[in-house]
Image (tube, rainbow, N blue to C red):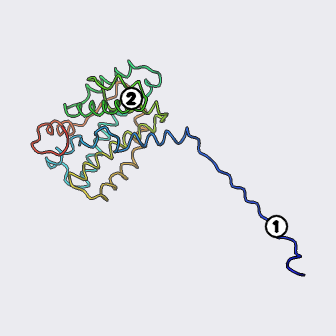
């Protein structure tokens, strides 16, 4: 039989289905990445959180000690104070309860153990408030100035307005702090970039469990106990030679 007289070969119909991820699930993730990014113009890179003084004093001199310092401040400062307060501010913003946010802001300010830590919290909070106003979050306008403006309040406000889930906001807050501390350690110890990434990976594995533990903290249990951080940040205020802001 001549080839031209044969029946045509069956055609296979391929149907391609495009599955789109709804914007409501992708945009909050991208907003969280934006909020936790080191490029966020709030000046976080300018602060070492007492780490520079700890290095100058010889408390931190290698990658292992840098990891221990970061881990200790995470456990005894951020997880005992910042994250429980962030949880309460997040819920207050959800309910448009600005007075509750101010109450917790005053509590947070009173809990900062050095002028440097208080100034860092206030200046970063005011910077984030200005940024949020420029991004059409008008409720941040009251926090652009004022002695009780703080980073936690503005971070939680952004999370609520951008639809970031509470747990993810807490993880993003801790990750952002860890990344800034590791960046400072890489410059100051100094550490290699690989050692810095190893510390970040080590911290990341432990952040979810830490957030889980924070969820059970009662109001009367909120607080922090990090004397080396308090001493280091206070000493840094008078340190003769320093790279980071005081």
Location of residue 28 with respect to 61 vertically, above or below: above
Residue 37: percent from the left, percent from the top? 37, 44
Q: Quadrant of the C terminus?
A: top left
- Find residue 168 and report its image quarter: top left
Instruction: Please tell me which residue is depicted at 32% across the width and 26% down the height of the picture.
Output: 144
Q: Nearer the viewer, residue 41 or 188?
A: 41
Residue 129: percent from the left, percent from the top? 35, 30
Q: Which residue is mark 2?
A: 133
Circle 2 Cα neighbour tier, 10 Å, few/some/many (<14 / 14–19 / ≥20): some
Q: Is residue 20 left or right of residue 72?
A: right
Mark 1 and mark 2: Cα distance apart in space: 62 Å
Farthest-out residue, left: 240
- Find residue 154 and report its image quarter: top left
Q: Is residue 200 left or right of residue 58?
A: right
How many numbered badges does the structure rendering display? 2
Location of residue 129 with respect to 1 vertically, above or below: above
Farthest-out residue, front: 4
Q: Quadrant of the N terminus?
A: bottom right
Q: Nearer the viewer, residue 144 or 90?
A: 144
Q: Earlier in the sequence, mark 1 or mark 2?
A: 1
Report helix, strand or loop for mark 1.
Answer: loop
Instruction: Please tell me which residue is depicted at 23% across the width and 31% down the height of the picture.
Output: 119
Residue 209: percent from the left, percent from the top? 42, 43
Instruction: Please tell me which residue is depicted at 16% across the width and 35% down the height of the picture.
Output: 234
Location of residue 215 with respect to 99 vertically, above or below: below
Check residue 86 in the rendering and tell me which mark sits there, or answer none: none
Check residue 10 in the rendering and tell me which mark sits there, or answer none: 1
Residue 109: percent from the left, percent from the top? 27, 26
Circle 1 Cα neighbour tier, 10 Å, few/some/many (<14 / 14–19 / ≥20): few
Q: Nearer the viewer, residue 72 or 41?
A: 41
Report helix, strand or loop for mark 2.
Answer: helix
């Amino acid at each position: 039989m001549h080839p031209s007289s044969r029946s045509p070969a069956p055609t296979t119909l391929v149907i391609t289905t495009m599955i789109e991820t709804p914007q409501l699930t992708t945009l909050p993730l991208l907003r969280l990445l934006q909020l936790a990014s080191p490029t966020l113009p709030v000046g976080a890179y300018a602060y070492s959180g007492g780490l520079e003084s700890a290095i100058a004093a010889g408390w931190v001199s290698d990658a292992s000690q840098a990891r221990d310092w970061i881990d200790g401040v995470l456990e005894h400062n951020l997880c005992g104070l910042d994250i429980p307060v962030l949880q309460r501010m997040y819920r207050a913003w959800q309910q448009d309860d600005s007075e509750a946010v101010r109450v917790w802001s005053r509590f947070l300010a009173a809990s900062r153990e050095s002028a440097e830590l208080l100034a860092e919290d206030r200046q970063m909070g005011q910077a984030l408030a200005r940024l949020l106003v420029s991004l059409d979050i008008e409720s941040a306008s009251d926090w652009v100035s004022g002695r009780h403006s703080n980073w936690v309040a503005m971070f939680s406000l952004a999370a609520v307005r951008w639809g970031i889930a509470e747990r993810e906001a807490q993880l993003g807050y801790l990750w952002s702090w860890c990344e800034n501390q590791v960046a400072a350690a890489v410059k100051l110890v100094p550490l290699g970039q690989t050692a810095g990434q190893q510390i970040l990976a080590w911290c990341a594995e432990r952040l979810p469990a830490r957030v889980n533990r924070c969820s059970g903290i009662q109001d009367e249990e909120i607080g922090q106990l990090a004397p080396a951080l308090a001493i280091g940040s206070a000493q840094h205020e008078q340190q003769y030679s320093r790279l980071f802001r005081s």
